[in-house]
Structures are given as C-alpha cells and as structure tokens.
C-alpha cells in the first residue's frame, strides 16, 4: 500500500510538472532577461504575457501548497513568484527620479505642513535678537556674557569704527572671517540640536533658537552703536537669509515632534511621534541643503562681493526664492503623497 501511495504521489507530481512547468520556465526566462538587460529586451507580446504567466505561476504555487507536493518545488515557485511580484508591481524609480520627487513634492510639502512651527521659530529668533540688542545697549558687560571672549578678540563695544569697518570689507586681521566661520558652525549645530532635542517637549529647542537670536542681536548692537548697522546687516544678510531660515525650519521640525509627543490628541504618542517624524525628517534633509548653500554664500559671496546693496540684493533674492519655492509654487501631487 505504501509503495502504491508513493507511486501515486510521484505520478501526481510528474503530471503537475508536465502540465505547468512550461509556463514557469517561460516566466523565469522573461524575468531573467528583463532584470539582466531591460524591459526593452522583450517584445510587445512577451511584455503582455508577463502578468498572465505570473498569475499562472501563482496559481501553481497555491496548488502545490494545498496538496503538499515536493518542498523543493514549493520553494522554487515561491522564489519565482516573489521575483515576479517585485518586478511587476514593485517601485522601480531611479535615483534621479527619487531626488526629483523629493525636491518637487516632498520637501516643499513638509515645509508647508510646518508653517505654524516655522512662524513660531521666526518669532522666537526675533525675540532673542531684540533681547540681545537691548541687553548690550543697556550694559556693555552683557556683550562678554553672550559672546565668548576668545571669539570677540577685543572687537566689542570699545572697538573703533575704523577697525570694525575694515573687517566688513577686507577682512581686517581676519576677525570677522573667524566670527563668520564660528557663526556658520554654530548655526549648523543649533539646527541639528533644535531638531534632535525637540523630543524633550520642545523646551531645549525654544531656548536654542532664543540664544541664537541673542548672539546676533548682541553683535549687531556693537555695529549699530558705531553707525555701521546697515553695513553689518549686508555682511550678514547675504548668507544669513538662507542660514537663519534653515535654523527656523530645523526648530520647527523639532517643535512638531515635541508637541505631538506632549499632545498626541486621539492617537497614541508613538503613532503621533512617528507621523510627525516623517514630516520633520523630510524638512531636515532640506535644511542640510540650505545650510550647504549658506556655506557657499558665506565662503565665497560674502568675501568677493563688497557692495552693501549687492549683498542685500543677493540675500533678499535667496530669501524670496525660498519663500516662493516653499509656499507659492505647489507641484501637482495627484497620485502621490504630498
């Protein structure tokens, strides 16, 4: 009886193979050629036959599993069906397409989604700026408390107008170049920390943005008091319009995560944080791009361009570009996630 049963299973397996193996092999051959070369290697008829052969192979796998046929055959069919699924239905976008999709849709959509938090960051930085300006204006000793003495190098409230002016246009003895390098490095760190520390219910993010504005306000007050406010503003604005905007966006990303953790609404905290994290992550990838652009402007544009009006024009142009790119021009997101 056992021999008869074994013969019956072998005959059943042989019959199963003879009926369907041709379709499996044909499907495998088409997938091999398409993966090795490209879909252009297949004729129109072969391309049209791919979904039909895939369904036939999938049906064979279902029968093989239900009748407990050879385990090696089941593994082969599972592997072939998996390859067919990913080829027919999986995403096959190239790197250029993914980058373009991020720049056209994902990044601007994330920034627009964060507009409330971004506005709050801008207000916080402005408050810090005013606070730093007024503190130094009321008491010069506040300058040393806000700006490290090793960085100030004596260029504080007691510096001469000629000394400060020379640094704005020809670098002087390198003080402003040092300060610019410090400011850029500091702003990159602030951007990263403002985002990363947002998990702590946004409090560290708020303090970082306030402090960053305070440093700018303290430095600006020194130049303003010497009648060089307009000149220092141009020196800073050419790259600061991009750099400071990036910091505000990073702060907004951190705030979004922190507020969602603190106030998840009807969702669980984990789900709310996960959803906020996807938006914030897209925004932070864009922040890195903005900081790179700001670094190039700081390293080349600020040093090569000494005209105050041109510095303001370039800085204003970049600010207008970012605002238009993020908030005015909206790509068609039908069929995709905005």
Image (cartoon, rainbow, N blue to C red):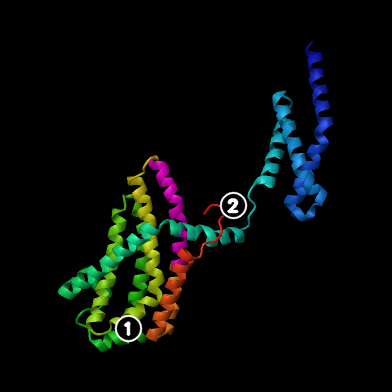
Residue 191: mark: none
Task: Please give left or right for residue 175 compared with residue 91 in the image.
Answer: left
- Residue 155 picture quarter: bottom left
Q: Position of residue 134 (x, y in %)?
A: 20, 72
Q: Position of residue 334 (x, y in %)?
A: 57, 54
Q: Residues within 10 Å of mark 2 (few under 14, many from 20)?
A: few
At 48% across and 67% down in the image, what residue appears? 325
Could you tell me if residue 170 is visible in this image? no
Determine which residue is flagged by label 2: 335
In the displayed structure, does residue 32 sit left or right of residue 304? Answer: right
Residue 289 colored in magenta in the image: yes
SS class, disc 2: loop
Q: Quadrant of the N terminus?
A: top right
Q: To which residue does mark 1 refer? A: 231
N-term-proximal mark, 1 vs 2: 1
Residue drawn where x is 41% and y is 70% of the image: 242
Residue 37, compared with residue 267, is above or below; it is: below
Q: Is residue 34 toward the left or the right of residue 111 in the image?
A: right
Label 1, residues with CA under 10 Å away: few <14, some 14-19, many ≥20: many
Q: Which residues are magenta?
A: 268-290
């Amino acid at each position: 009886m056992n021999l008869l049963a074994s013969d019956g299973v072998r005959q059943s397996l042989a019959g199963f193979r003879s009926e369907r193996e041709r379709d499996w092999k044909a499907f495998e051959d088409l997938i091999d050629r398409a993966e090795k070369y490209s879909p252009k290697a297949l004729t129109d008829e072969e391309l049209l036959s791919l979904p039909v052969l895939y369904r036939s192979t999938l049906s064979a796998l279902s029968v093989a599993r239900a009748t407990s046929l050879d385990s090696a055959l089941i593994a082969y069919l599972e592997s072939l069906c998996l390859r067919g699924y990913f080829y027919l239905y999986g995403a096959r976008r190239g790197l250029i397409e993914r980058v373009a999709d991020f720049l056209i849709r994902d990044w601007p959509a994330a920034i627009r989604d964060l507009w409330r938090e971004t506005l709050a960051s801008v207000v916080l930085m402005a408050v810090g700026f005013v606070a730093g300006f007024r503190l130094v204006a009321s008491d010069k000793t506040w300058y040393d408390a806000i700006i490290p003495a090793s960085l100030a190098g004596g260029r504080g409230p007691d510096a001469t107008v000629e000394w400060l002016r020379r640094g704005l246009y020809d670098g002087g003895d390198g003080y402003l170049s040092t300060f610019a390098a410090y400011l850029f490095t500091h702003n990159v760190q602030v951007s990263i920390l403002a985002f990363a520390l947002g998990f702590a219910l946004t409090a560290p993010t708020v303090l970082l943005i306030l402090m960053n504005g305070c440093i700018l306000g303290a430095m600006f007050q020194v130049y303003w008091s010497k009648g060089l406010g307009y000149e220092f503003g141009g020196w800073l604005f050419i790259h600061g319009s991009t750099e400071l905007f990036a910091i505000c966006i990073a702060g907004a990303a951190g705030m979004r995560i922190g507020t969602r953790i603190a106030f998840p609404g009807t969702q669980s905290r984990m789900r709310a944080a996960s959803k906020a994290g996807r938006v914030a992550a897209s925004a932070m990838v864009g922040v890195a791009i903005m900081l790179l652009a700001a670094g190039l402007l700081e390293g080349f544009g600020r040093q090569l361009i000494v005209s105050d009006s041109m510095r303001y024009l370039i800085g204003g142009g970049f600010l207008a570009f970012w605002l238009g790119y993020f908030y005015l021009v909206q790509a068609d997101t039908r069929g995709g996630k905005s």
